[in-house]
Image: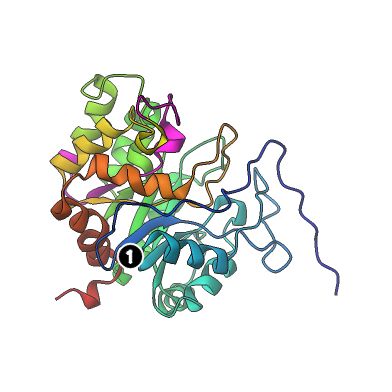
């Protein structure tokens, strides 16, 4: 049987080989609440409508990274390069021995039976992507129909957008019927003030709508300074930390963190995932905060049946 050979997008950086072992000890039961699997393409082909072709990043490689960094569990988010074909995601979930939950991408025509099958595999949410350079997103009426279908299952909705687009999306976001989790703090421009108009609008969104959570993830994607730190790479991405720290302090029960491995679409530098774990100490400096960010909150959202 012949298989399709996929050629990754020009300029795409492969994920970091041999990540460092972080010195920051994670709390027992810590969850990497945002990561992906890509293919492998010869087993789980990439979607014809994709806007990029990644390097392969298998479930085995993800689980090895989980163990190396000191996490106990993963939340695997459907990658846009796979479109609505969730087979790679489901395969990873079923292979995780209950240590992974998933966030899928689905179409408006999904049936109750199909939702149930995804639920049985470990899916607990759907992702709506509003980043125009990554996807051609569906009409809002279709997204509202999907939200109504998944709400009875107790699923939540993950939304991915960029900060300048928040005003036009505000009404749609605030009318969603489920818990809503925002990817990467709504992608703020960290060269602007942490208490400036743009980020204040996102803080207002969370303050006025207690069903909205945020991931304090992807400093490597948001940073303007990158690995350039005054005292070495261990303290990288310090221009992003104040934004994440503000949300940690204001909304400690509604924040999550994830590696974003294998870091899709990065063309500047590829982060050492061990350094990303070190970064957690800057946004959640106390053991109590790390317990909440990495264990209590993701367990409540993804494994509620295990929370007393």
- Please state the horizontal and vertical placement of residue 284, each as a whole percent of the image: 21, 45
Query: How has the structure been colored for display?
Result: rainbow
Compare residues 263 and 300 and report the one nearer the observer. Answer: 263
Horizontally, is 122 left or right of 92 in the view?
left
Which range of residues does the magenta coloring cover?
Answer: 206-231
From this view, report whether residue 269 is shown above or below residue 192: below
Image quarter (top left, top right, bottom left or bottom right) of the N terminus: bottom right
Q: Is residue 230 above or below residue 58?
A: above
Q: Which residue is mark 1?
A: 155
Residue at (39% x, 26% y) in the render = 164
Which image quarter: residue 10?
top right
Count of marks, rendered view: 1
The image shows residue 300 at horizontal and vertical percentages of 22, 65
Q: Is residue 222 magenta?
A: yes
Q: Quadrant of residue 308?
A: bottom left
At 56% from the left and 69% from the top, the residue drawn is 60
Tell me if residue 111 can be seen: yes
User: Residue 295, image x and y in percent?
Assistant: 24, 62
- Of helix, strand and loop, which one carries label 1? loop
Q: Residue at x 42, y 50 (%)?
A: 274
> Would you say residue 216 is visible in this rendering?
no
């Amino acid at each position: 049987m012949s298989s399709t050979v996929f050629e990754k997008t020009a300029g795409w950086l492969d994920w970091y080989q041999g990540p460092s072992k972080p010195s920051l000890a994670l709390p027992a039961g810590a969850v990497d609440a945002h990561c992906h699997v890509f293919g492998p393409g010869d087993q789980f082909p990439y979607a014809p409508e994709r806007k990029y072709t990644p390097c392969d990043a298998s479930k085995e490689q993800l689980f090895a990274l989980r163990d190396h960094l000191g996490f106990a569990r993963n939340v695997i988010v459907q990658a846009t390069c796979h479109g609505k074909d969730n087979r790679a995601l489901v395969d990873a979930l079923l292979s995780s021995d209950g240590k992974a939950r998933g966030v899928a991408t689905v179409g408006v025509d999904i049936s109750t039976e199909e939702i149930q099958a995804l639920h049985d595999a470990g899916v607990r949410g759907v992702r709506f992507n509003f980043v125009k350079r990554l996807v051609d997103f569906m009409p809002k009426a279709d997204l509202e129909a999907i939200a109504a279908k998944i709400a009875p299952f107790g699923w939540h909705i993950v939304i991915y957008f960029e900060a300048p687009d928040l005003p036009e999306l505000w009404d749609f976001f605030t009318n969603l019927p489920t818990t809503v989790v925002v990817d990467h703090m709504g992608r703020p421009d960290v060269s602007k003030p942490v208490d400036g108009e743009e980020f204040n609008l996102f803080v207002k969104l969370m303050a006025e709508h207690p069903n909205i959570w945020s991931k304090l993830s992807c400093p490597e994607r948001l940073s303007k300074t990158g690995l350039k730190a005054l005292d070495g790479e261990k303290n990288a991405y310090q221009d992003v930390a104040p934004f994440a720290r503000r949300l940690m302090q204001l909304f400690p029960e509604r924040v999550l963190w994830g590696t974003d491995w294998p870091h899709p679409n990065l063309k500047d530098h590829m982060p050492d995932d061990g350094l990303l774990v070190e970064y957690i100490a800057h946004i959640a400096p106390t053991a109590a905060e790390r317990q909440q960010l990495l264990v209590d909150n993701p367990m409540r959202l993804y494994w509620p049946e295990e929370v007393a």
